[in-house]
Image (cartoon, rainbow, N blue to C red):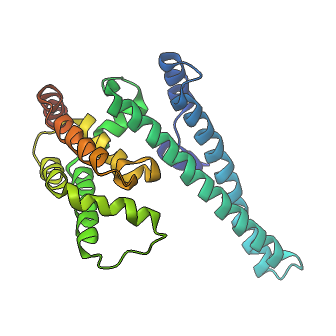
Amino acid sequence: MILRQSILSRSVPTAREHRSAALVLGERHPLPKALARHRTVTHQTIVAIATAPAAALAALAHVAVGPVFLGVSVLVGLGFVAVWSSTRRTVVDRVHELIAGGAASLRLPVVVRERQRLASRKERERLARSLEHALDEVWSISWLPARSRALQGLICLRDATPEARAVIQTLRCEQVSVRGVAMAAQLLMDGQRSALYSGDRRRLREELGRIRFALESTEESQELAHGQRAAA
């Protein structure tokens, strides 16, 4: 029971956090909906995983249906873990949308936690390296499969090399705006919705310019520096 409570406290928003988000944003807002679904799926995942030890014991005890029970339990558990990962990603995406949209000052716990994570040097360096890696990749491609739509879009990054390098450099600065970091995360993680994979050179260059401008926002940078000093 203690282990279960510990897992829950780290991996799922509390009912109070969900109510706070619904109160501030409204029940129909995508974030409260995502929080509610993630909370439900987390409980279901824990229950599914909890059956695995019993199934393993049954298999070890040579119970006739033990191996079948174990196999089913493992498959069900893996399925729930995949769904959990998806709902968790959806929550993060909704929070990034809020922060990138200028609502970074919301005092909702889920937003505050993500602000702190995005503000960390570790996360900013991870994003900078991801963009840097993508840039290195597109310059190393010598042949492009005709049907590779993702690469067709990503190849446009070559034409936006100066803008991409500027974003990488700014992400590594001491003081940056969390809104800009959230925008950079969206660029790298939004898949086909992202300008990075759109195949539109102008759109990509403009988006990188917006990200750099947001990262260099003086007011938010000062707020971030204050928050980092307070956390220390």
Q: Tell me the residue at 65%/40% (across/down).
A: 40
Q: Tell me the residue at 35%/29% (across/down).
A: 101
Q: Is residue 198 above or below residue 79?
A: above
The part of the image, by quadrant, that contains residue 160 is bottom left
Q: Tell me the residue at 11%/39% (across/down).
A: 175
Considering depth in this image, is 102 or 117 the residue closer to the camera? 102
The part of the image, by quadrant, that contains residue 63 is bottom right
Q: Tell me the residue at 28%/68% (across/down).
A: 138
Q: Quadrant of the C terminus?
A: top left
- Which residue occupies the extreme right position in the image? 64
Count the labels in the image: 0
Q: Is residue 103 above or below residue 225?
A: above
Locate residue 119, reporting x and y percent.
24, 42
Q: Is residue 64 left or right of residue 193?
A: right
Locate residue 131, reporting x and y percent.
26, 58
Q: Is residue 26 left or right of residue 151?
A: right
Locate residue 211, reporting x and y percent.
23, 41
